[in-house]
Image (spheres, helix red, strand yellow):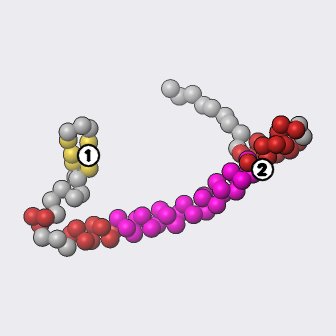
Amino acid sequence: MGSTVTAASLADIIRSKKAAGRTQDLAVLPILEQALAEATHNAEKAPRRSEESELANRDLIRRLLALPPEKRTNFLRKRVGICQSCL
């Protein structure tokens, strides 16, 4: 507990493999560059997904609140532990 692990970023690994110039390092460069491009692309899309999920949650709450009280019980409850829940 409380340990710190230092790791190089994918961009740093790509730069070091290019600088080394070994054949086995150059062979994996296309795969690493593709992974970096996908990670960058996914990181750009992440905030929008978060906004969309927030809007979806609000819409769900609005729809559930529109139901009669006897049909909307427990929709705001969250599981706590194995057999407990809370609001």
* Labels in figure, total: 2
Residue 65 place in picture, x, y as percent: 21, 69
The amino acid marked with disc number 1 is Arg
Q: Which SS type dominates the magenta stretch?
A: helix
Q: Where is residue 70 in the image (x, y as percent from the top left)?
A: 9, 64
Q: Residue at x 64, y 60 (%)?
A: 41
Q: Residue 38's spot in the image, x, y percent?
A: 65, 56
- Depth order, front residue of 70/29: 29
Tag 2's secondary structure? Answer: helix
Q: Of all residues shown, which one is farthest toward the left?
A: 70
| Among the two numbered marks 2 and 1 on one chain, the one whose residue lies closer to the N terminus | 2
- Is residue 8 a member of the stretch shown in magenta? no
Give the percent coordinates (x, y) of residue 77. 23, 53
In this rendering, is residue 1 above or below 43?
Answer: above
Range of magenta residues: 32-57
Above or below: residue 1 compared with residue 46 = above
Q: Could you tell me the amino acid type at mark 2?
A: Pro
Tell us which disc is closer to us: 2 or 1: 2
The one of 13 and 76 positioned closer to us in this rendering: 13
- The residue at which mark 1 appears reads as 79
Judge from the rendering whether residue 40 lies leftward or rightward of residue 26; answer left or right.
left
Q: How far apart are marks 2 and 1 (CA)?
A: 45 Å
User: Circles 2 and 1: CB distance less than 8 Å?
Assistant: no
Question: Which element carries disc 1, helix, strand or loop?
Answer: strand
Q: Which of 28 and 2 is in front in this view?
A: 28
Is 4 on the left or on the right of 11, as rendered? left
> How crowded is the residue under tag 1: few (<14 C-alpha within 10 Å), some, or many (20+)?
few
Residue 17 vs residue 81: left or right? right
Disc number placed over residue 30 in the picture, else none: 2
Q: Quadrant of residue 63?
A: bottom left
Quarter of the image for residue 15 reads top right
- 60 shown above or below 43: below
